[in-house]
Image: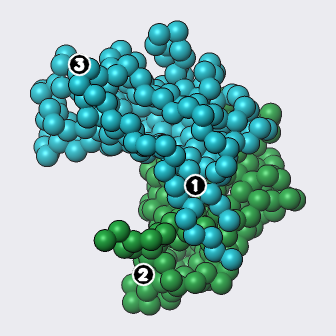
Amino acid sequence: MATANTFTQIGSTVTVGSGGAATISFSSIPATYTDLKILLSLKSPVTTAAYEVFGINFNNSTSYQGRVLYYWFGTASTGSETTFTKSSTTYARVFDTGINTLSTTYLNPNIYSSTEIYIPNYAGGTNYKVYGAVNASENNSASDGGFLELAAGLSSNATAITTITVAGRDNDFMQYSTASLYGILKY
Amino acid sequence: MAAGATYVSIASTTLGSTASTVTFSSIAGTYTDLVIIVSAMGIVGSGAGANTNFLRFNGDTSSVYSDTRLAAGGSVSSSANTGAGSMNLGNGNEANTDNLIYSPHIYNIMNYSNATTYKTVLANYHDLETTGQRVGAVVGLWRSTSAVTSVTIYTDSSNYRVGSTFSLYGITAA
């Protein structure tokens, strides 16, 4: 039997205020869903680089491994991803070019990156926690700026996820960046 | 006006014993699109090409499937199948030594219930273990105008391990 209403927002959308934000966190995540999905619209105030590295942390875990496939300037490349540390917290390095910046060399200042992260079986107590993610920006240019990334990663920690924090490696999130968390319940 | 419930759990299977095939059948045509979430681990086999996931619609084994894949492991690669008996959705269920890592895959099946167009699949796969990871994107085609009423997912080189989950969702347009 099909079950309706299985895609539910958890809490409210976080919108970064005028002062910016070093991180965005979702805490006290209930274990009542099957999977989680995070949707992000992010920008960083840095003007000297085209992109900011994006990371995620589950429950203050410290061990992560991942793989990224990215397409930029007409070339597809891949990288093996580990971690970065910001304010004593270890983050999985999810995307190399995951957050748009204010650099006018590559990107229009009004463009925010778009990111989706899927976390299956986040509440299980016997499985390492994994994620699949896609990230993109379009710049209305045939020669530069647009990028597309696909990432896979895991946290070598079997504890149920109750807190998720996202961060840029070197810079804050700018005003109007948003983050939304959804729970998906299977039949 | 916003619609009501538009993301519906149709069915889900968590394996209580090993299996090489999972089928969702009697899928109603009342949704607009389908989403399948796979969280799976293989019994044996690791490395590039191990434990590939394949998909068939309506039990059709004839040579009417094709797919194009872009993948990243140690390097970027692309590949394609034409005239195949199933859709290759990428390798992705590492038989990891600690038995704790179920790799996630997301399959989107658009406009599955119409009877006038061929059916397409857009998929992302994420192949994970602690010593190596792969990620890829796939577009697949089933050259049939039949409405999709069943979906079969199977792996080639080993069974799926106990605890692997397969969930089917329906999305309704507003």
- Determine whether label 1 and label 2 are within 8 Å by CB: no
In whole angstroms, how far apart are the C-alphas of marks 1 and 2?
29 Å
Image coordinates of residue A156 in percent, x first then y, are 69, 28
Give the foreground label among 1 and 2. 1
Count of marks placed on residues: 3
- The residue depicted at 18 percent of the width and 26 percent of the height is A102
- The residue depicted at 51 percent of the width and 66 percent of the height is B7
Identify the residue under disc 1: A184
- The residue depicted at 51 percent of the width and 33 percent of the height is A26
Q: Residues within 10 Å of mark 3 (few under 14, many from 20)?
A: some
Tell me if residue A45 comes above or below residue A143 in the rendering.
above
Identify the residue under disc 3: A46
Element at badge 3? loop
Identify the residue under disc 2: B118
- Relative to the observer, which residue lies in front, A50 or A30? A30
Q: Chain of mark 3?
A: A
- Label 2 amino acid? Tyr
